[in-house]
């Protein structure tokens, strides 16, 4: 049986203030008082696994051990069928430049890589989000969510982040970059993983 979160302090294994605030708001009804790994001075561990769940586990367990508190991590990315699942767990790496992370560059690299294949559009793709809730004693629970769609070019929309402007969810006419945030959040890979997390560890 999955262990339940008992309330109190919860470390978010992220140095992204916006993500920490968003998760904190979502978990506030369940008695979680969130604090970020960055606020606690915890480092960012190297992500060496080949799966989203594996890398989420690395981050959650490092934060849980470092803080002596339960910790929640998120690992997510874009997988493209015609690219054999790439960029996958290296999604952020494809956006790295000398000046830092630039997802416009990342999108251009994905589209260029598709041009080097024999594949024809529509290009099937999906986003995956893996959430791991870990405890200092080594116990954990992992929940995953996916959203499927196709890639478009040129990218459309200024909303969202990352590769959202080139991702068109199944059955939709707007990319994640064009959608109202509330609409995107209702169907996104992160929303689906989060619903599973709440049902497994926070609800009831």
Image: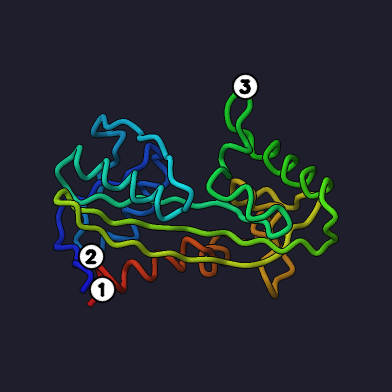
**Position above or below: 19 against 194:** above
User: Which residue is at a point 43% across and 40% down the rendered structure image?
Assistant: 48
State which tag comes first along the sequence, 3 or 2: 2
Q: Is residue 114 left or right of residue 84?
A: right
**Mark 1 and 2 residues: CB-CB less than 8 Å, in contact?**
yes
In front here: 181 or 192? 192
Residue where numbered disc 3 is placed: 98
User: Which residue is at a point 83% across and 62% down the rendered structure image?
Assistant: 121
Split into 4 quadrants, where in the image is the N terminus? bottom left
State which tag comes first along the sequence, 1 or 2: 2
**Mark linked to residue 30:** 2
**Position above or below: 116 against 139:** above
Locate residue 190, reporting x and y percent: 47, 60
Q: SS class of the residue under badge 1?
A: loop
* Quadrant in the rendering for residue 106: top right
In front here: 189 or 93? 93
Q: Dot 1: within a 10 Å radius of its alpha carbon, few (fewer than 14), some, or many (20 or more) residues?
A: few
Q: What's the coloring here?
A: rainbow
Residue where numbered disc 1 is placed: 203
**Mark 1 and 3 residues: CB-CB less than 8 Å, in contact?**
no
In front here: 173 or 190? 190
Q: Which residue ends up furthest to the top in the rendered image?
A: 98
Q: Nearer the viewer, mark 1 or mark 3?
A: 3
């Amino acid at each position: 049986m999955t262990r339940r979160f008992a309330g109190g302090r919860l470390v978010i294994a992220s140095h992204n203030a916006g993500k920490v605030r968003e998760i904190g708001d979502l978990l506030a009804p369940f008695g979680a008082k969130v604090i970020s790994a960055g606020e606690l001075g915890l480092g960012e561990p190297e992500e060496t696994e080949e799966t989203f769940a594996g890398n989420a586990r690395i981050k959650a367990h490092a934060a849980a051990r470092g803080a002596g508190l339960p910790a929640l991590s998120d690992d997510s990315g874009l997988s493209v069928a015609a690219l054999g699942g790439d960029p996958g767990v290296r999604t952020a790496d494809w956006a790295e430049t000398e000046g830092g992370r630039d997802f416009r560059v990342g999108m251009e690299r994905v589209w260029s890589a598709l041009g080097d294949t024999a594949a024809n559009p529509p290009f099937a793709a999906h986003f995956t989000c893996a959430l791991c809730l870990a405890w200092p004693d080594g116990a954990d629970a992992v929940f995953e969510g996916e959203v499927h769609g196709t890639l478009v070019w040129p990218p459309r929309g200024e909303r969202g982040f990352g590769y959202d402007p080139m991702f068109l969810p199944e059955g939709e006419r707007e990319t994640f970059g064009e959608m109202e945030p509330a609409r995107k959040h209702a169907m996104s890979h992160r929303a689906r993983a989060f619903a599973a997390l709440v049902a497994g560890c926070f609800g009831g």
